[in-house]
Amino acid sequence: MSGEFRRYLFPHDHPRLADVRGMDPHSYGEFSKEPGTFTGGLVEGWTPLYRTEFRGVTEDGTLREGLYPLEPARPGEEAPVAAMVAAVTDLLAALSPEDRERIAFPVDAVEWQTWANPEFLQFDTGLRLEFQPPEVRERALALVRASLSPEGAASVHAMMLVNGFLGDVVDLPTVLGEWSYNLALYGTPDLRAPWGWQLYGHHCAVHCLVVEGRMVVSPVFLGAEPDEIDAGPHAGLSGLFADRIDAGLAVMAALDPDQRRAAVVYEQMVDPAMPPGRVHPGDERHLAGAFQDNRVIPVEGVRVAELPEAARQRVVDVVATFVRLLPEGPRTARLREVEDHLDETWFSWIGGHRPGDVFYYRVQSPVLIAELDHHGGVFLDYDTPKTFHIHTVLRTPHGNDYGRAWVRQWQAARARPTTAEPR
């Protein structure tokens, strides 16, 4: 616990806070779309992107086929589908008929792609939890706990708790709250057929789909400003991304000087050598964030296959910190999938690489993109990235974000005409 973030508090009457204080999520969402505001340009750029037909993130614009065959889960790798079905059944039982209709979408609906990680409500998909009674909120968290690993569910809730803490610190409880999140369901809950859920809001967006005992949790966005709670009922919560930070630094420490130079794409977080647009006003150095479902992201840095064994293992350790959200069985399957493509995996870095430095890194392969970035201030007053403001992104490239590759295979298999057996 450092409390360093308190050095950067805006004055209570600063326009950044005072101009939106007291707004509800919908009025603040409309305010955020206005040209000239802090967020207006972001909304203008992002709004048209989500309706683009989904293809998936690629490194060169060409989708690779056959990366995600839809096969039943291997023994010991099954997703906890029965527990998920029970949890979602309990959740639906607590909703009014109108809310049951509002929360539900087809399994391949475009609304999967409406998620965003900023605090403003750009798309009001599903149910806004802050407007739901405590019973519904708790059953929503129960669905998260039934789906993810214990540490994964705790991490998701921690992002929500920090968001509420930030709202208390800057006195914006109607904009930043523990329950300032939307929940939507996709498909019909079933033990075999594809279905899933989406939870998104400030600094937390998680997408989970299951089919045939398999699970994909992607895209995932987890972040925090600050990365600790130093007061109130949840005081002591800290180090939310310590494992991902330490794992990234361990990769750099395992490289020799030549390899380190190859991995470092830019030495400064805002570097004169960067091309225009490389630092986005909202995403900063992230490339695979919200509304980037079809982005072409060329590989950079150093090819992991060319690194010594110790460094290759440190890259796998980075991936393990990102997929820790998954329950044990699907996590095992996901790590095997990543390791099968380790020879096609790249590791890149921006910024310093000593303890206490701010930096960005990306692990990129045909089946995974994992990014971590230190950010500048949004609700706290600083322009350059700080160690206590962290964003992370996890993607499944080449078409299996939202489990879409599996859903398409499931649908195609059931759309094929059957041939009658000869008599």
Image (spheres, rainbow, N blue to C red):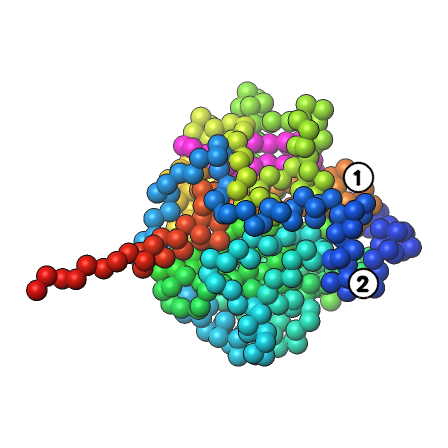
Instruction: Locate the C terminus and report the quarter of the image it occupies.
Output: bottom left
Q: Residue at x 65, y 52 (%)?
A: 117
Q: How many marks?
A: 2
Mark 1 crowd level (few <14, some 14–19, many ≥20, 10 Å Cα): few
- Where in the figure is residue 128, as x and y percent of width and height? 65, 66
Q: Residue at x 55, y 57 (%)?
A: 111
Tag in front: 1 or 2? 2
- Where in the figure is residue 51, as x and y percent of width and height? 56, 50
Direction from residue 5 to residue 326 in the image, left or right: left
Q: Would residue 147 be counted in the magenta stretch?
A: no
Name which residue type carries label 1. Asp
Marking on residue 383: 1
Direction from residue 226 to residue 157 in the image, left or right: left
Describe the element under mark 1 as helix, strand or loop: loop
Label 1, label 2: how far apart the Cα atoms are: 25 Å
In-front residue for pair 106/232:
106
Reading the image, the residue beneath label 2 is 23
Judge whether 300 appears above or below 147 on screen. above
In-front residue for pair 423/12:
423
- Where in the figure is residue 65, as x and y percent of width and height? 37, 41
In-front residue for pair 58/212:
58
Mark 2 crowd level (few <14, some 14–19, many ≥20, 10 Å Cα): some
- Where in the figure is residue 204, as x and y percent of width and height? 63, 55
Q: Which residues are magenta?
A: 343-365
Name which residue type carries label 2. Met
Q: Residue at x 26, y 58 (%)?
A: 417
Earlier residue among tags 1 and 2: 2
Marking on residue 178: none
Q: Residue furthest left?
A: 423
Q: Can residue 167 be seen by looking at this rendering? A: no
Q: Residue furthest top?
A: 258
